Image (spheres, helix red, strand yellow):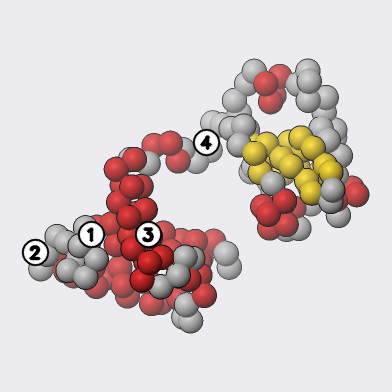
Amino acid sequence: MTNDIKVGQVWTDGGRDVLVTSVFGGRVYFRDRYGLEISDMLERAFLTKHTALHESVDVSTTDDYHDKKHDAGKSRPDLIPGEALLAVGAVLEYGARKYTEDSWRSVPDAEKRYRAAAVRHLCAILSGEETDPESGLDHWAHVACNALFVLALRAGK
């Protein structure tokens, strides 16, 4: 597939465009509209699913990628409160120590089990308990973490 990809091409999945910035050694590198570099790992998940190809563009002169932001209606992850991200990160770190890093992805019947875990933490909150006694972390952070797991699992379907 990398033989069909050329520097300056814009690939899309219908909602997110990425600009090919370099192709070498069988690897493809992209930048999204926010300037984030996306490498081969995402390319396999992204380009093997989406094949709509736009005409090549001259990246040195194209205003679309240098002077403008076409982000109206796009997701705004920068609006997620940093404190909440740090709290969820603490739950993830605790889980990585207790189990293994990213082991949540391979749990059997994962979506159902993470929904149940979120509800258990909500029940603890509703009963007046703010901190999970096992981890010492805020129950709301556990709820958010489990909800993110469910969202990620559903997005992967």
Instruction: Tell me which residue sits at (74%, 42%) in the image.
Output: 29
Q: Which mark is residue 93?
A: 3
Q: CA distance from mark 2 to mark 3?
A: 25 Å
Q: Which residue is most to the front?
A: 97
Q: CA distance from mark 1 to mark 2?
A: 15 Å
Q: Residue 73: which disc?
A: 4
Residue at x 23%, y 59% (from the top left corner):
137
Of circles 1 and 3, the one toward us is: 3
Q: Quadrant of residue 140?
A: bottom left
Neighbours of disc 1 within 10 Å: few (<14), some (14-19), many (20+): some
Name the residue carrying label 2: 128
Between disc 4 and disc 2, the foreground one is 2
Ranked by sequence position, the earlier of labels 4 and 2 is 4
Instruction: Check disc 3 and give the amino acid type.
Output: Glu
Provide residue 150's location: percent of width, then percent of height: 43, 65
Which tag is nearer the camera, tag 1 or tag 2?
1
Q: Quadrant of the C terminus?
A: bottom right
